[in-house]
Amino acid sequence: MDSVLVKDIGIKVLFAGLGGLLLYWTITAAKLVINARGINPMVKQFFNQISAGRVDAAYLLTSKAYRQHVNRQQFINFLIGLKLNRFKNLKSGRPRIQEGKITLTLKLKAENKEELPLDFTFIKVQDEWRIDRIIEANT
């Protein structure tokens, strides 16, 4: 009789643990989606500015901290080195939150199946997202 009681309690504890884990995952996912609102339009605006030749406007979408470490000419040289004109499509990865910043891996895709993964780190400045870092991703 005791083993039946222990088994019954064990199953209830297991289900309670799974329910708690599911609730935690749901809350975390919802928080991530809510916090990341506005990033995709900003990314689109950033690449639209670059494709239209308005590099200065794209540079102004970066954070003040980014502009203190990367001057305008370094930014232009970085973009030239990426050879962005080869890429026609953009695929966004899963955002990751760390210390109030959101990192998003964007994969630029060319017609010849070539991919360029870039890690963008975003920070919120006065209710607007700004690019705080851009690096080539190691995937």
Image (cartoon, rainbow, N blue to C red):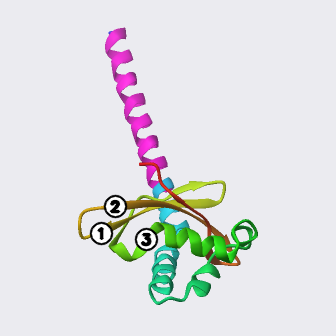
Secondary element at image label 1: strand
Secondary element at image label 3: loop
**Viewer-proximal residue among 100 and 19:** 100
Mark 3 burial class by Cα count in 10 Å: few <14, some 14-19, many 20+: few
Label 2 sits on residue: 115
Mark 1 burial class by Cα count in 10 Å: few <14, some 14-19, many 20+: some
Does 1 appear in magenta?
no
Q: Residue 29 placed where, x, y %?
A: 46, 57
Residue 56 appears in which quarter of the rendering? bottom right
The residue sitting at 41% across, 48% down in the picture is 139
Q: Residue 105 placed where, x, y %?
A: 45, 59
Mark pair 2, 1: CA separation: 6 Å
Label 3 sits on residue: 83
Label 1 sits on residue: 110
Mark pair 3, 1: CA separation: 11 Å
Do the numbered discs 2 and 1 sit on residues whose CB atoms are within 8 Å? yes
**Viewer-proximal residue among 21 and 76:** 76
Mark found first going from the N terminus, 3 or 2: 3
Mark pair 3, 2: CA separation: 12 Å
Mark found first going from the N terminus, 2 or 1: 1
- Single out the residue that lies furthest toward the left: 112
